[in-house]
Amino acid sequence: MNRLQSTAPAPAGRPTNVRFLTLTLCITMAMLLYLDRYALSPLTSTLLNELHVSKEKLGRGVFFSFFFAYAVMQVPAGWLSDTLGARRMLALYVAVWSLATISMGLVNGLAAIFFVRFLLGISQAGAYPTAASVIKLWFPYGARGRASSAVSMGGRAGGLLAFAITPTLLLLVGALLGWETGRWRLVFAAYGALGLVWVCVFVWLYRDSPREHPWCNAEEVALIAPALRIRGVPLRHALPPLSILTSREVLLMCVIGFCVDVGWVFLVSWLPQYLIETYGDQLKEVITTITHRPYKNGDEEVVAGVMTALTGLAGMIGTLLGGLATDRFVVRFGSIWGRRLPGVIGGVVVAAIYLMAPQLKNVWMFVGAMAAISLSIDFCLGAMWATYQDIGGRHVASVLGVGNMCASFGAAGFTWYAGMLADEKRWNMVLALAAISMIVAAGSWLLIDPTHTVESGEPPGNDGAEVLPETI
């Protein structure tokens, strides 16, 4: 007998809350996703020293290899989840990337780093598309936006943890075991083990449909399933590649995604190393002031990681504000400018801060500027996701996959090129290129018309279903 069936569902007449258990699984998955993805970033200085590689080579091996694989596999991974089911594929994705994270602790050269990070990118590519399908299956139409936002916030929280706790865990391992080198290897083994535990819990608790879950009563199924009354439209639709690739709005969103990722990826890749190289003496002063002890090797990575985590916290706030803003703007200014304004505002603000940032001589002022950039970029996200939904019609997943692919190519190329510029101490050029990309993004937003969908004659947001009133 299935162990789940040993626990009786809630009494009939009141909907159970299994959908929130499912949401919790997705949120924790997103936290692990970003934790494993960005745990290397605050350890850049350690890897440069222990593996004896240049910044350009590390950028190619750690960042480019991941984002390139992540970009290429966006659409295939989403299709596999649609075809084989989220329970099977999401468990597989998390298991593979957890093993890749553990393997990161075993590498000894650049080729091995490239392979492991490439595998990480392939396996993580299907995570968010699969989570989106889970939300669609388990939440009524009117609750999907909030549920999706919660998953996105989980990812941001995982990134914050990656920067805040990874360097501290390195120091803890060194203190407990007396290791001077290789401490990061044990940390990655622990992170990967957490993912494998999540896989076991997920396979035990999750089902691909509310009707299949023994804890989900008829009232909760009725709450979720009848939210849409299908009007003779098949549940699966053929992919219209020509319509997508020739859509002006899709192409503009690809440009926006590419440029926004160029402007954003510095914060989650090279920012800790920039702080160490540019404000190293001030970081040491911060350490001695807070701890009242002499500086020790590796302390600056802890402080730089915490400072980077603060920018991630600002991004989480920006995500909430941006989602509220685009909804308010649509009511006040209409659907076109309601989507455009957050992107234009965010792009212009970010570009201005990037251009001003090199002039800041105080590390806390610089971190504040980076936090403002993170908040402003994530302020655009609500409008971006809503625009994908507007123009995608019945093909949101396909349109979003194309856009995410282009965005990931931007992140892949820029992290590599930024490493080359960093080797030459041309950090100001890195920030200037990020500013230029955000100006291009803001200009592209001015051309977006979210009322144009990939299929002519289809009104924005129509998925072939009539939405009925519902309560949550």
Image (spheres, rainbow, N blue to C red):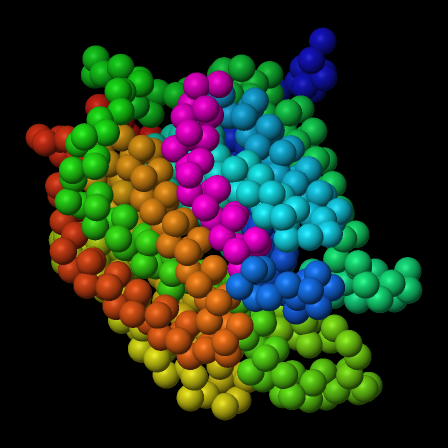
Q: How many numbered marks are there? A: 0
79 is within the stretch colored magenta: yes
Question: In the image, 280: left or right of 396?
Answer: right
Residue lying farthest to the left in this orientation: 457
Q: Is residue 305 visible?
A: yes
Q: What is the span of residues highlighted in magenta in the rendered image?
A: 59-84
Query: Which residue appears at 49% of the width and 21% of the height?
Result: 85
Q: Position of residue 77 (x, y in %)?
A: 45, 30
Of residues 35 and 180, the one drawn nearer to the viewer in this rendering: 180
Question: In the image, 469: left or right of 296?
Answer: left
Q: Position of residue 368 (x, y in %)?
A: 48, 78
Q: Is residue 32 visible?
A: no
74 is within the stretch colored magenta: yes
- Placement of the N terminus among the 4 image quadrants: top right
Q: Position of residue 25 (x, y in %)?
A: 58, 36
> Measured along the vertical axis of the image, is residue 86 above or below residue 306?
above
Query: Which residue appears at 39% of the width and 76% of the height?
Result: 429
Query: Which residue appears at 16% of the width and 52% of the height?
Result: 448
Of residues 356 and 383, the one drawn nearer to the viewer in this rendering: 356
> What secondary structure do most residues of the magenta stretch adopt?
helix
- Placement of the C terminus among the 4 image quadrants: top left
Q: Position of residue 381 (x, y in %)?
A: 35, 54
Question: In the image, 43: left or right of 425?
Answer: right
Query: Which residue appears at 52% of the width and 47% of the height?
Result: 66
**Residue 247 falls in which quadrant of the image?**
top left
> Measured along the vertical axis of the image, is residue 155 above or below residue 57?
above
